[in-house]
Amino acid sequence: MGASATDSNYRFPGGVPQAALHYLDHTEGGISLRALARRAGVHPSTVLRQVRGVETRRDDPLVDAALRRLGAMPDLETKSATDRSGPTSEERMIEILSRLGETGAVLAVAEDMEKAVVVRETPDGGSARTAIVDAVMAEAMALRNWISCNAPGRVSRYRITSTGRQVLAQAAGSARERFASTAASPFVADASGQRRRFSSSESPLTLLARRRMPDGSFFLSPDQVRAGIWMREDFELSGLSPRAALRVLEEDEETAAPELGRAGHAAARRRLVSSLHYLGPGLGDAALRCCCLLEGIETIEKHLGWSARSGKVVLRIALARLHSFYSTGEGRDAKIIG
């Protein structure tokens, strides 16, 4: 399941927890607990607790899969897990964790599948997919105890743990500090120079989906919410930076075409670019900033120079038009991603 454990270019996402390394060195490598303790500079009882703790979690399908994957890896790949893939994988796992922090969200993992999906209950009683996750990344999150499953089965459902919520809170705190140091910019710079946004535990679209009109009806229809979720999926899969996605609205399709050469899901990039041109400036700005860049309505109004309370109206129109795009032609393929 997932990437081959013997691929020399492969790195376990985000690095391997120390407890898991001790468990593997003891059970797979035959190194004694005392030797591991001396190497780590801790008491042998500490290593014993780590090993026993990992062993008790092997009933979890993702934890067991992660340990089997790591056990089959050459020593170099296991020890150097944080070298190249660490920061990017860490950010992606935080993004997935934020989706799981939303009310009613679970990670659904099917046996022998290379992808898992995050689904969330919708106001109409249905469910909507909010993210797609590589199986190995889900394994890494489970191994860190960020997510857990109470009832494993053919399709196991994972929820965020208290440890996961603490990690999410720490990431949000770090993001707020970076926002303050960049003149309240909605983005933070990563090591590659691209700017990425850390999301709160609930996206602006999720919060708007709960709002009701004076007559008791929801402010956004289920179709509008689903359209926003599909756009978010396309953005995540596209490989486009926030800056490049915003630039699409300022350019025609031929000018924007070079961005499609970047790494990522080509079909998702085409849909995202097509949807933005379908919406056009204004509507496209509102949908992209709210659904993909996770900006709140007041922030959108400030950036675009709109009057107060106009952003919600524009976004509602944009999502209705976006649903029309995803219901016909090229956009229809987004419904079967993953």
Image (cartoon, helix red, strand yellow):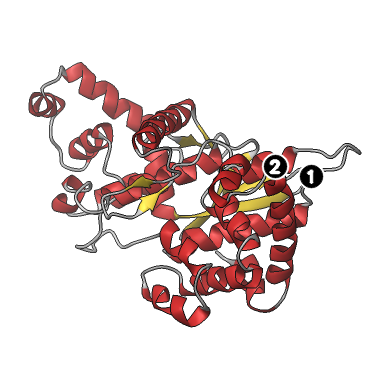
Tag 1–tag 2 contact (CB < 8 Å): yes
Q: Residue at x 77, y 43 (%)?
A: 123
205 relative position to 142: left or right:
right
Q: Which residue is mark 1?
A: 219
- How many numbered marks does the figure carry? 2
Image: 124 above or below 259: above
Q: Residue at x 37, y 36 (%)?
A: 144
Image: 118 above or below 259: above
Query: What x and y, as percent, mark residue 239?
Result: 41, 64
- To which quarter of the image does residue 169 belong? top left
The mark found on residue 244 in the picture is none
167, 45: nearer the viewer = 167
> Is residue 62 among the parts visible in the rendering?
no
The C terminus sits in image quarter: bottom right
5, 136: nearer the viewer = 136
Query: What x and y, as percent, mark residue 290?
Result: 59, 50
Query: What x and y, as percent, mark residue 337?
Result: 57, 66
Q: For numbered disc 1, what is the local secondary structure?
A: loop
Q: Residue at x 40, y 36 (%)?
A: 179
- To which quarter of the image does residue 278 belong? bottom right
The mark found on residue 208 in the picture is 2
Q: Residue furthest right?
A: 215
Sequence-wise, the earlier of marks 1 and 2 is: 2
Residue type of the residue flagged with mark 2: Leu
Residue type of the residue flagged with mark 1: Phe
Image: 51 above or below 110: above
> Is residue 226 among the parts visible in the rendering?
yes
